[in-house]
């Protein structure tokens, strides 16, 4: 499976920065943001290929917070293959992934299956509504989770549970909260910039 994707070629030896849009977004949603955060990096932004009443997503769901797990498995495999090919094409030895909402969920799902593909994860408002199996390959991976304390789509206790799971696998997980809901706040943007600068 191939994805429509926006690509900006970076300088030799620079990291690969992958971005994943939220439901209803496109490959443009975070492409420019990644270029601002990391000038010189290779940036690749795949477009979700599942339509939910016209809104683009990376995998199907049957309701709010209820995933089609068979479809998620298939599309996680497809995205892992895509990321693997992008790594090879850019010859990058460091890969950063940033995803928001549905984009964060496909990125997290890939990391749970193929943790060697992405070194640094930025998960904005993720929702992992199942109990992931232990994954020792996540050890020492750097992860930033950003979330809203009143997010009706991604409840705070489930966000906290994901952070706890990642820490239990040995990942270096940070959690940034803002007081609002599912929207992206300026404090999240600042936290992401600080996380990458560190």
Image (cartoon, rainbow, N blue to C red):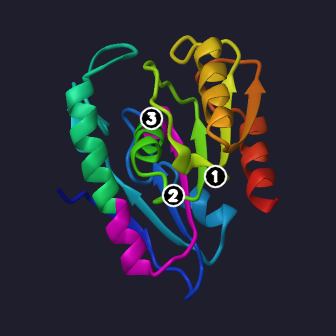
Distance, label 1 to label 3, CA atoms, is: 17 Å
Give me the residue at 39% from left, 45% from top. 113
| Callout 2 touching callout 3 (CB < 8 Å) | no
Q: Nearer the viewer, mark 1 or mark 2?
A: 1
Give me the residue at 76% from left, 25% from top. 178
Distance, label 2 to label 3, CA atoms, is: 14 Å
As drawn, 10 above or below 197: below
As drawn, 140 above or below 22: below
Secondary structure under the numbered disc 2 in the rendered image: loop
**What residue is pinned by disc 1?**
141
Give me the residue at 68% from left, 22% from top. 148
Give me the residue at 21% from left, 24% from top. 53
Mark 3 Cα-neighbour bin, 10 Å: few <14, some 14–19, many ≥20: many
| Callout 1 touching callout 2 (CB < 8 Å) | yes
Residue 188 coordinates in the image, percent (x, y): 72, 38
- Earlier sequence position, callout 1 versus callout 2: 2
Residue 64 coordinates in the image, percent (x, y): 37, 13
The boundaries of the magenta stretch are: 83-104
**What residue is pinned by disc 2?**
118
Secondary structure under the numbered disc 1 in the rendered image: loop
**What residue is pinned by disc 3?**
105
Residue 175 coordinates in the image, percent (x, y): 74, 33
């Amino acid at each position: 499976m191939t994805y429509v994707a926006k690509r900006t070629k970076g300088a030799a030896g620079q990291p690969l920065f992958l971005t994943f849009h939220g439901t209803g977004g496109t490959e443009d949603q975070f492409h420019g943001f990644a270029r601002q955060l990391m000038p010189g990096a290779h940036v690749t932004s795949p477009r979700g290929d599942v339509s939910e009443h016209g809104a683009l997503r990376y995998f199907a769901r049957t309701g709010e917070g209820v995933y089609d797990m068979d479809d998620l498995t298939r599309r996680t495999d497809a995205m892992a293959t895509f990321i693997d090919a992008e790594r090879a094409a850019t010859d990058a030895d460091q890969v950063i992934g940033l995803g928001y909402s549905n984009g964060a969920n496909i990125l997290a799902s890939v990391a749970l299956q193929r943790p060697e593909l992405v070194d640094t994860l930025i998960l904005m408002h993720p929702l992992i509504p199942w109990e992931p199996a232990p994954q020792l390959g996540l050890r020492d991976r750097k992860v930033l989770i950003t979330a809203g304390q009143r997010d009706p789509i991604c409840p705070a206790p489930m966000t906290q549970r994901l952070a706890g799971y990642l820490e239990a696998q040995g990942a270096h997980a940070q959690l940034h909260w803002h007081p609002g809901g599912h929207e992206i706040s300026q404090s999240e943007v600042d936290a992401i910039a600080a996380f990458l600068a560190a």
